[in-house]
Structures are given as C-alpha cells and as structure tokens.
Image (cartoon, rainbow, N blue to C red):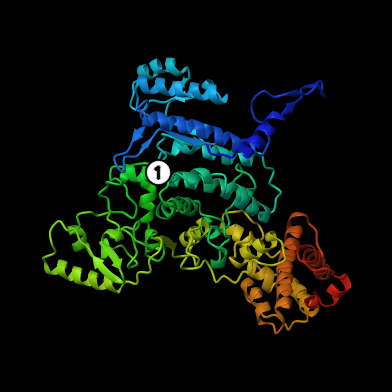
Amino acid sequence: MGFPEAWCTWIKGILDSTCASVLVNGSPTYQFKSEKGLRQGDPISPFLFLIVMECLSWLLNKAKELGLIKGISFPIDNMDINHLFFADDALILGEWSRENIQNTARILRIFYLCTGLRINIHKSNLFGIGVQDEEIDGMLEVLGCRRGDFPCVYLGIKVGAKMTRIGNWDMVLDILNKRLTSWKAKNLSMGGRVILIKSVLENLPIYYLSLYKAPKAVIESMEKIMRRFLWTGCNEDKKINWIAWDVITTPKKEGGLGLSKLEDVNDALLLKWAWRFKSGGNCLWKKVIIGCHGSSRNWAFLPCKASASGCWRQIVKLCDKKVWSGNTLGSHFEAIVGDGSTISFWMDSWLRDEPLRLTYPHLFRLEKHKWVVISDRLRLDNGVKTVFWDWKTAPSSAAEVSNLFNLLEELYAFDWLGGVDKWRWKPRGSGVFTVKSARTLLSHCPTPVRNPQMKWKGWTPLKCKILVWIAILNRLPTKVELCKRGVDIQISICGLCGSDTETSTHIFTGCFYAAEIWSRVENWCRLSPMIVFDVSDFLKIPGNQPMSKHAKYILRGIIYTSLWTIWIERNDRIFQNKRRRAKEVFESIRMTSYFWFKNRTNVISLDWKDWCNYPLVTM
C-alpha cells in the first residue's frame, strides 16, 4: 500500500510486543505472546483494522475489473457498486447469480488466508431482492449464513420498511417510554424537567428523524410524551396542561419557552441532506442519487423521479415547503458561481433569487438539456462572455424572443469572478448551513405569543424564571384559573390577604399583603414606589431605573426572586397551613437572593451585611 519500511517496522514491533495474561480466581497467570490479532483498547487498533479492510475492498474491486463478480450498475456515469464498508460492518452488493455468490465467497476465503480475519458467518445474512424464497434457501448452502428478510435493521436504522406507516415508528416511541420509566422525576422542578426534555428526550429520536420524515401522528405521539412529562414528571398521570404546546415550543425571544417542535427538528435534519447534495462535491451517495434520479423529468430543486418513494422523495418535497415569509426552503440556498461546472443553469438559484426555469418558462420549454450546467451555456474567455444555446426549436414567438433578450441582458451584466463553485445558506451570515439555523428559520413566529419582556439570562434558577414566564401569561394555577378548568373550588378568595378573588394579577400587584413585601423590597433596593398593574410591569422596572447595567442585572434577579417567594408563601398557606408575616417573607427574599447570587455568578466575595444594606452595588 506504499507505506515506508520504517513505518512497517514500527507497526510490526507493536504487534510482536503484545502480551496477555489470564485471570484465575482473580490472580493473573504467566504472560504469553499473542500470535495474531490486535490489542483490545489500543488506539492504533481501529486504524490498522481499516488498513486491512482496505485490502478486502481492493480484492472486490479487482474481481469486478476481471469480470469475476458483478455489482449494482447505474445507467448514468457507468457507475458500479459492489460493496459498502462502515467500521466492522460489511455490505456486499451484486447481481443475483450462483456464480456471483460463489466468487464472492472465494474472495472472502482468500481474504481470511491472507489476513487472518474471518467473516462471522453466524452473524451474516443473505438478502435477495425480487427473488423467490426457495432460490434464496438454495444459495444459503454456498455461504452457510442465515437468510435475511426485509425490513431489517442495519446500523440501527430500519431498512426496507415503509416509514410513512405509523407502526414502523413503535421502536422509537418505545425508546422514549423506556427512558421515562427509568426516571424518578415527579418531585423535580419544572426547570429540571425542561432541561431533561431539551438534553435527552428531544435528542433520542434524532437518528431516525435525520433520515426519515416522521408522520404527523408519530410527531404528535412523541410530543404528547414530552408534554405529559413536562406537567407531571412521568408518562402516566394526567394533569392540566396550563400552556398550549405551540406556545411552549415558540422561541424564547418571541415569548415562548424555547422547546423544540419535533416537526421543525425533523425538517431541519432532512434539509441538511439537500445542503450536502449541493455543496458536498462528488461523493458516492450523491452519485447514487444522480444514478437513480438523474434522468428525471421532475424539475424540482433536487433531482427526483416522479414515481419515486422513500426518504429521498420526502427530502425533495421538503425543499418546496413554504416558510413564514412565503418563500420555499429551497430558495434559501444560493449558488455562488465559480467555474460553473457544477451549478445547473436552469434549476439552481444563481442569477436571481429563483431558478431561471421559473423566470423564463418559455425558454426553459425550448431547452434540449434541462439539467445543463452553467459552463455549458456561458463561458468567459479573456474577459469576453460567450453564450451557447441548444434549443429544440429556435425562439420565435413574441414571449420567447422577449424572454431571450431579457435573459441575455442579465447574463452579460452578471459579474463572473471565477474560481470554485460554492453554495451559500442565506439565513446565516457565514453562509454555511447548520441544523440550528434551519430550525430557527422554521420555528420563527411572525406574531409573538406576547410582548416578550422576559429576560432569560440571569442569576436566578430556571425554575424561578419559568414561574415568572407562566405568571406573565396568566397561567398560574390560581383559584380563579382552576375554576375555569372545572376544578371544584369552594372559596376562590386570595390565600394571602383574603379580601379579593385570587388571580395572578391580584396576588402580585393588588394584594395588600404582597404590597407590604414590595414596599420592603423598594426600601432595600432604594427604589421609588413601583407602579404596576400587571405582572409584566415588574419586568419593565429595571430598564426604567437610572442605574448601571450591572445594578439592573441584580435588580431583575431580585424581582424574579420576590415573585417566586410570594408564590411559595401562597402555596405554603394553602397546602401546608403555614403562615408567615410579610417581614419574614421579605427576609426569605433577601436570603434566597443572596444564596442564588453568590453561588450562581462569578462574584469573588459577597458579604452578607453588604447585601442586606444595599445589594445593587455588589461586585
């Protein structure tokens, strides 16, 4: 393979120095040298294994050149594939014939004799597509392996299954349910549940969602599991869902909680294949797609036969999906012309924000080669542009001639810089596609849920911020809100002051018990009297104060802590029959905010006396 002799000597030394010992009742025996094989856990072992597998790849390709085996042929580019390797998994492909299978078995035998690596027959399967079962059983005698049936699981993915059927997603739903069963999260705060959903539950189905378009019913089932966990901590109990899932999955900057819509995640992951197809060069999988769909008369953003089905068909359809701006997802891919050898003249967006086939449909109808690239129609020699056409019939009608003159005017005005063809993802400044930027584009809400006054960056815990967010939306489980949802509440009077009906607005802004607490907070922070009519008004207070940015940062956290502590006091009175004076609640606010600020910021030293005296100058 061309490695220098010194390198081969080093590798031989590594292999010859391998020793092993057997543990007998926990005690090692004498050491002995290994005659063959690689050291388990050695970082160089996977590399050496890949080098050896390269020999098998060479053997199969050489056998194909000699006509001993036949792979799968594609009509375009005369491409022939006979094997695919991934780590220690080998997929050998070919025409169905006894001679082909016998020669493949002989090659595997030669590979074993040369390298010592033997194919594990007991873990291997023989698949026949479009072949009778009796014929497959006859071929099993040649290889000695088991018969494989579709659908099957390969590299953790179902192959050969119709993934538009809901039943084929049961294994994904089972994974989510099993993970929830192992969690004891009933006593976990909502902030903790949100973190678990974002970091675990949303990521469990990603492998499947990156290859297949999930049916709407499957998306709803997965989101139902997450929704139940968010509000109950498990997947069994049923409790009131205080906020609609559409609001919860709205981005934080637009008034939501920022959880992901699985449909948007699914679309963003699939859209990455479109980006790879356009910008990934001349890789093998792209050649396979072109070989299968390249002769298509379906003039979509990506080549696809009209009769095709499966995951590629779903990806092509996704590119025609319209987002909130009214543009399709495919229109957000922009071609940057270099030499024009890989960009389609009619199908790709390079001269305008849309393909030329849409701008000049009369000319496109006359084009003989629909998928022609730019370099075959437009050339630049010594700064002079030359246009070449290949029409079925020359443009003759008024519309066709008008289209032609307009197109020529644009082509001659086009600033051609040369170089290498590139693709740009418009929604991102760098132009490089990311799944995150695609999710942001898909999840954008043109009409925010509510005026997004929430500041999620801060030193208070997530559970505290979520409570404030729920209070802004007026979705706290107050007595009035419980009555609206059919809960039998005998007395709907405020549990803090006992003078008015209990609503979120009353508890935090109209209750005289809370007013005394806010008065103490004002004196502590040296603020002018706060005039608030709604919970959202509290969030405007730091911005209206003539103080430094750092002081506003601290004040915002103190307000969040105050809202949290008042709500905790309300719950303690109702459910635990514990009552505290307003002064005691205020002291709890000071202690809680001190503890959170000290442990959740980078402050080097924080004195309790200084905090009690005036917290807004703390550094």
Can residue 120 be seen here? Answer: no
Residue 472: image x %, image y %?
A: 61, 67
Count all numbered tags in the image, as a single digit. Answer: 1
Depth check: give the residue in front, 120 or 130: 120
Residue 183: image x %, image y %?
A: 67, 42
Q: Determine which quarter of the picture holds residue 106.
A: top left
- Is residue 383 left or right of 558 when viewed as pictured? left
Mark 1 — residue?
311
Q: Determine which quarter of the picture holds residue 129.
A: top left
Which quadrant of the figure contains the C terminus? bottom right
Residue 229: image x %, image y %?
A: 61, 48
The 10 Å Cα crowd at callout 1, few under 14, some 14 to 19, many 20 or more, is: some
Depth check: give the residue in front, 198 or 292: 292
- Is residue 500 left or right of 110 when viewed as pictured? right
The residue sitting at the front extreme is: 5
Taking the spot 74% from the left edge, 61% from the top edge, the residue there is 568
Residue 310: image x %, image y %?
A: 37, 41
Can residue 319 be seen here? Answer: yes
The residue sitting at the left extreme is: 396
Helix, strand or loop at mark 1: helix
Taking the spot 79% from the left edge, 64% from the top edge, the residue there is 592
Q: Is residue 599 above or below residue 33?
A: below
Depth check: give the residue in front, 253 or 15: 15
Depth check: give the residue in front, 144 or 563: 144
Under mark 1, the amino acid is Cys
- Is residue 332 left or right of 33 when viewed as pictured? left
Q: Determine which quarter of the picture holds residue 535.
A: bottom right
